[in-house]
Structure formats: structure tokens, C-alpha cells
Amino acid sequence: MVSCKQVMEQLWDYLDGELPPEATQEFAEHIAACKRCYPQYRFEFAFLEAVARQRQRLPGPSGALVQRLRAILSP
Amino acid sequence: MPNGAEVRRTSVEEELLAAADAVHRFALHLAGDAVQAEDLVQETYLKAWVHRDQYQAGTNARAWLFRICRNAFLKTGQRANREVTVEDAELEAMGAAGLHASVAGSNPDGTVFEHPELNAVVQRALMKLPEEYRTAVTCVDLEDQSYADCAEILGVPLGTVRSRLFRGRRLLQQDLLAYAQDAGLLRGMKETT
């Protein structure tokens, strides 16, 4: 049985998919049922989503750069 | 008909080229400048091509290229101009924990992070992080690398990755939440909920 303390200590590991499957399942069940841990989980989840969204905001490599990379890989 | 070596070479070329977008993003986070990032990506691929025999087709091409890219970046000396000392950053991280706890109480579900105005400043806040923290956050949060792959990329133990990642995230939260407070985003959210 996982405790609130364990969830708080390993919340990032859980969110990053770094826990073993059995522990992941226990964390998921605890978080879904715990009024104390769930808001913290939502807070960190929303933060990570905001960071991950930056992937779509950044410009890709220019066409000229891609051409140069193709030339490097196919000399 | 192509022989086995030619097929393998084509496969590796395709894998490396498919990673170009991710390597470009990674280089942007390291260099902080579009022109320098393009130079860094080109240098990365030149080095990758020279050492292509070290890459095993079908494994993690992005992680392999990220590692080459970061090593190339560190050799350029650009890092010295951008880096904040780790000691200073650690002190900031301690303050971040307190700020986070106080704002988590007024905005417990983190909806502030979904605000369009805050979304627009995440990139700027990310670039303000010390390089070690920024790279760990970029690897895991933007490029979906595992802690183990991130450790390989950075050439550090797993525990160091966790430490840099968690401190980097707290610093980033501190910056974003300070912006949200100054911009009145938290107050606005409280009024609407």
C-alpha cells in the first residue's frame, strides 16, 4: 500500500513513467482516490504539459539546413 | 540490387535525418540562438557521419545525436557565457520550493499553466535556466527521453539526472509563477473560479 509521503517523494518519477509497472498501478490508484495527492498531481501534470507544448512552438530546421544534412549523410 | 551494407547505411541515414527536428530543438535550447543552433546541428551531423559505425541502427538515434550535439556545444566555449553557477542555482531552487507550495495552495490544479499568456513565456523561462538544468529538462520534458537515456546523453550518473531535472523544474516553476503573480494571472483565475 503506497503512502502519501511516497507519492510526494516519487511524483516526478511517476509522471515521467520511470516507476515499475506494479508501482505505477499503485500510484495511479492512490492518486485517483486521495484528496491530498490528486491536486498536487494535477498541478505538476499541468506544468509538464505546458513545458511539453513548447515542442510545437519552436521553429523547425530551415530547408537549407535540411539540404546540408542530406548532403552530409549522402556524400 | 543493394547489398546488406548499403541497405544498413540507407537505414541509418534515414534514422539520423528523421531526428533532425529534435536535434534542431535540442541545439536551440543549448545555443539560445537560431544561427548558432544551425551551425551546431550541422557540426553534429558531420561528427555523426564520421562516427556512424558507433551507432547501432534501430536504437535511440535522437539520444545518440543529442550526446554528440551537447559535446560539440561544450567544446565551443559558448557555455561559459551563459552558465549560472550551480551553487547559485541551488539556492534559487530552495526558494522555488517555498513559492511553489504557496501558489499550489491558491491554484491547486495548476490551471495557471494552461493560461495562453503564461504558455508564451515558458520558452523564455526555460532559456534562463543554467545549462545543466536546461538540458536535463529539454531531454526529458520536451524530447521524451528516459532518465537512463538522459544520463547517457549528459555522461552523468542517473542520480545526477534526477537532481538536475527536479531542480530545473522547480526553478522553471518559480519563474513562471512569479510571472503569473506579477501579471495578475493568479488573481484573475481566483476571481473566475
Image (spheres, helix red, strand yellow):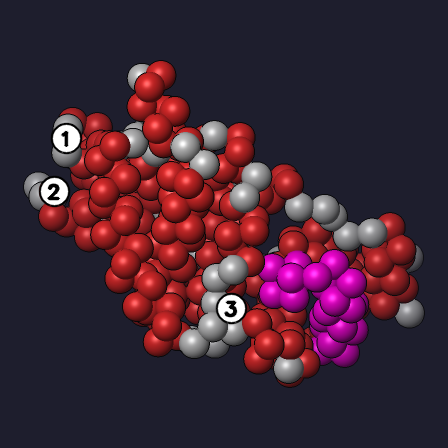
Q: Earlier in the sequence, mark 2 or mark 1?
A: 2
Horizontal placement of B19 versus B79: left or right? right
* Mark 2 and mark 1 residues within 8 Å of each other at the beta carbon: yes
Chain of the residue where label 2 is placed in the rendered structure: A
- Is residue A63 among what the camera can see? yes
On whether disc 2 and disc 3 are found on a single subunit, the reply is: no
Q: Amino acid at mark 3?
A: Glu
Query: Which residue reaches farthest top?
Result: B192
Look at discs 2 and 3 and give the one toward the viewer. Answer: 3
Percent x, y of residue B70: 60, 72
Residue B35 vs residue B25, the one in the foreground: B35
Q: Name the foreground residue: B36 vs B56.
A: B36
Q: Quadrant of residue A36?
A: top left
Residue at the image position 63 percent from the left and 39 percent from the top: A56
Q: How many marks?
A: 3
Q: CA distance from mark 2 to mark 3?
A: 33 Å
Q: Quadrant of the N terminus of chain A?
A: top left
Q: Which mark is residue A4?
A: 2
Q: Give how far apart the Cα atoms at labels 1 and 3 are.
A: 36 Å
- Badge 2 marks a residue whose secondary structure is helix
Residue beneath label 1, please? Answer: A34
Q: Residue at x 55, y 58 (%)?
A: B127
Picture residue at 74% right of the left edge, 48% below the top: A60
Q: Assign a secondary structure to mark 3.
A: helix
Q: Which residue bears the numbered disc 3?
A: B131
Magenta residue check for A25: no
Question: Callout 1, which amino acid?
Answer: Cys
Q: Which residues are magenta?
A: B27-51
In front: label 1 or label 3: 3
Mark 2: amino acid? Cys
Query: Which numbered circle lies on residue A22?
Result: none
